[in-house]
Image: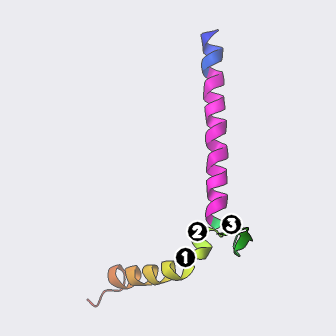
Amino acid sequence: MEIIRFILMVLVGGFIGWITNKVAIKLLFRPVNPVKILFFTFQGVFPKRKDQMAVSLADTIERELLSKE
């Protein structure tokens, strides 16, 4: 009986982890365009900061991959 309980706990924990990871990934990338609800504006983290990330990535590539040497 203990093995069934253990398997059930593992399956439930895995399912909960899968759902939270799925929701977290969706929230990082969506919504692409800002959505305003009452006093709050929602937008995905990556679409909101794409300009800052592009500058940071360009600086890193210039510094690490395309050195003057």
The total number of labels drawn is: 3
Q: Would you identify the image quadrant in which residue 25 lies?
A: bottom right
Q: Residue furthest top?
A: 1
Quadrant holding the C terminus: bottom left
Q: Residue furthest left?
A: 69
Q: Pointers 2 and 3 in contact (CB under 8 A)?
A: no
Within 10 Å of the Cα at label 2, are there few (<14), some (14-19), or many (20+) other Cα atoms?
Answer: some
Q: Position of residue 9 (x, y in %)?
A: 62, 25
Q: Would you identify the image quadrant in which residue 32 lies?
A: bottom right
Within 10 Å of the Cα at label 1, are there few (<14), some (14-19), or many (20+) other Cα atoms?
Answer: few
Q: Pointers 1 and 2 in contact (CB under 8 A)?
A: yes
Apparent side of residue 43 relative to residue 58 in the rendered image (left or right): right
**Which residue does the numbered mark 2 point to in the structure image?**
45
**Secondary structure category for the residue under label 2:** helix
User: Which residues make up the magenta segment?
Assistant: 7-28
- C-alpha separation, residue under disc 3 versus residue under disc 1: 12 Å
**Which residue does the numbered mark 1 point to in the structure image?**
49
Whichever of callouts 3 and 1 sits on the residue coming sooner in the sequence is: 3
Q: Residue furthest bottom?
A: 68
Q: Would you identify the image quadrant in which residue 15 lies?
A: top right
What secondary structure predominates along the stretch shown in magenta? helix
Classify 15 as above or below 29. Answer: above
**Secondary structure category for the residue under label 3:** loop
Q: Position of residue 17 (x, y in %)?
A: 61, 41
Q: Position of residue 16 (x, y in %)?
A: 64, 38
| Amino acid type of the residue tagged 3 in the rendering | Arg
Coloration mode: rainbow
Q: Position of residue 19 (x, y in %)?
A: 67, 45
Whichever of callouts 2 and 3 sits on the residue coming sooner in the sequence is: 3
**Which residue does the numbered mark 3 point to in the structure image?**
30
Q: Residue at x 67, y 59 (%)?
A: 26
| Amino acid type of the residue tagged 1 in the rendering | Arg
